[in-house]
Amino acid sequence: MSLLNPSKGWRSSSSRLLALYSSLFVAWSCILMGVLYYEVSGYLGDLSRHSLMQRQHLFQRFDGEELVEALTTSMTFDMKGVDAYGLFDNQFNPISGPIRVIPPDLPMDGHIHALANCINSDDPKLPRDSCDAVATHTEDGRWLILVRANGSLFGVTRIILHALLWGITLTIIPGAAGWHLLRRRPLRRIRGIQASAEAIVAGDLTHRLPLSDRRDELDMLAAIVNAMLDRIEKLMNEVKGVCDNIAHDLRTPLTRLRAQLYRIQQQADEDAPHALQLDAAIAETDTLMARFRGLLRISELEDHQRRSGFLVLDPLPLLQELHDFYLPLAEEGEMELLLQVPASLPWITGDRALLFEALANLLSNSIKFTPPGGEVILRGVNDAGSTRIEVLDSGPGIPAAERAAVFQRFYRVDEGNQQQGGFGLGLSIVAAIINLHGFKLEVGSSESGGAKLTLECRQQLMPEA
């Protein structure tokens, strides 16, 4: 069983919280920028219209040549491309000023109006975009057009907008750097916890989750889990000790019992009426002793200190030896045993004798449950740089509902078949060996409908002894 990988990127809780905070910060900053822009724009717009209105009232005091002189003098202080004027006669013919054509959208009512397109002219000194304009009828019957572009207004608002954008940018950059740094440490701690949890899931209950000196929420949770593991390990050791002691203590009297039964059998006549009963009693005693040996074997394999003797080995000779060893048994059962391996396989780390025992158990089960004329395949595959070993047969297979239970102790798929039913400990021993090596064993269906047992020899995590 493998645990989920730690969340990466935006999927981790710290990343999501930081991203939520950053989103809220940016959203509120945009709202602040919009409100500020609206308020400043409104204030500057009112200020611009008020200034234009003052100019209108000022020039209404002049007439004749005094008005022309006053307008000409004002041009010296006006901003080019922002303020402009035009003086027209009562027939709307231009008299003075840079504005030679009255804007078509300007009502001649003496009120200030906002125009989207101010003056259609290529003169850079005249405002062409949006502007405020007013048409005033002078006392001598002429028309005075005063225009003030909103470019100055937009210049001020652009300055404010750029300042706000720079402020948000300079806030987001440290925020992104902080997000990256803040999420790394929790993820590193989670990976450390996962590594210890993987070792515990693999069966090494001596491992504990790491603790830091901060004593934060993760440390509190790890301490709770470690306390639970201490209790579980204690109970498991007590149960295991009781079972091992029972199996060990009963093995000696069973051995003596078998010896006594065998002595009585040898002393009795072959045609004695109780000879068959003695044979049955000896067979049952052998069965009990085999079961106790299996239990002690599983207990021995669950001791993870055996990892210290693991070596790097080539699986090809191991598979060839298994094929040669079981080929006569397959031929005796009138079935075909095939070995399918490439020219080379990735090396694996483990105990060769234990791996031979586990694969031999799988191979013997396939041969045992495959009918005459069937086929058993022992296959080695290079799976992306790691070795995968498959045992396939054309037998009845293992029902999907029972595949997870076949590795339990004393469990047998076909309880009614006494000819092929064992003690229910073979696959339990296999599971203990696979667990000791940190490998993964899957049960499926072969192409012919039989069983397919796949041993993945990836050793991504090897807990230390």
Image: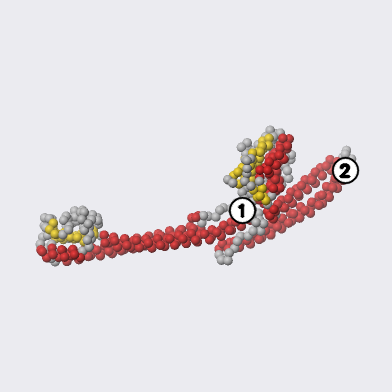
In the shown orientation, is residue 38 left or right of residue 446? left
Say which of 154 and 46 sits in front.
154
Q: Residue 102's spot in the image, x, y percent?
A: 17, 55
Q: Kindly indicate whether the residue at mark 2 contacts the one at mark 1 (C-beta within 8 angstroms).
A: no
Residue shown at 74%/54% (left/top)? 244
**Looking at numbered disc 1 in the image, what kind of residue is underneath it?**
Leu
Is 67 left or right of 375, judged from the image as shown?
Answer: left
Residue 286 placement, left or right of 6: right
Q: Secondary structure at mark 2?
A: helix
Q: Which residue is mark 1?
A: 461
Instruction: Please give the residue where the numbered disc 2 appears in the rendered image.
Output: 266
Viewer-nearest residue: 160 or 122: 122
Q: Identity of the amino acid at label 2? A: Gln
On residue 92, which mark appears?
none
Q: Quadrant of residue 198?
A: bottom right
Task: Using the image, determine if residue 163 lies above or below residue 382.
Answer: below
Residue neighbourhood size for the residue with mark 1, other residues' Cα within 10 Å, grouped as few (<14), some (14–19), many (≥20): some
Q: Is residue 309 above or below residue 221?
A: above
Q: Which quadrant is the C terminus positioned in?
A: bottom right
**Where 174 falls versus 332 (above or below)?**
below
Q: Circle 1 sits in a helix, a strand or a loop, which is it?
A: loop
Q: Is residue 80 at all visible to an observer of this figure?
A: yes
Q: Nearer the viewer, mark 1 or mark 2?
A: 1
Q: Position of residue 365 (x, y in %)?
A: 70, 41
